[in-house]
Amino acid sequence: MTPRTTLLALAEILVWWAVLAALWLVLVSTVDTLELAVGAGAAGVAAVAARAARRAVASR
């Protein structure tokens, strides 16, 4: 993997994370510190899964 593809992959994951974390913040009623940490972690896992799913569909 070249540095350019690595940066593009990280940028894609960061964008997915930001969108999913923002969606979570819209849907939650109160924001506690622990809930914020769990939401950020879940958004991170979902961002990696979203990128993997997009790459799997694109490579067909």
Image: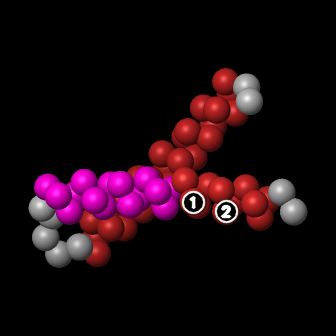
x%, y% of residue 41? Answer: 35, 54
Per the image, label 1 sits on a secondary structure element best described as helix
Residue on which disc 1 sits: 49
Q: Are marks 1 and 2 in contact (CB under 8 Å)?
A: yes
Q: Is residue 59 magenta?
A: no
Picture layout, residue 17 above or below residue 7: below
Task: Locate residue 58 relative to residue 7 in the image: left or right.
Answer: right
Number of residues whose C-alpha sits closer than 10 Å to that of mark 1, classed few (under 14), some (14–19) or many (20 or more): some
Residue extent of the magenta highlight = 33-47
The residue at 55%/53% (across/down) is 48
Residue drawn where x is 17% and y is 75% of the image: 29
Question: To which quarter of the image does residue 19 belong?
Answer: bottom left
Q: Amino acid at mark 2?
A: Ala
Q: For mark 2, does the 10 Å Cα neighbourhood hold few (<14), some (14 to 19), or many (20 or more) residues?
A: few
- Counting from the top left corner in percent of width and height, residue 18 is at 41, 53
Q: Is residue 54 above or below residue 4?
A: below
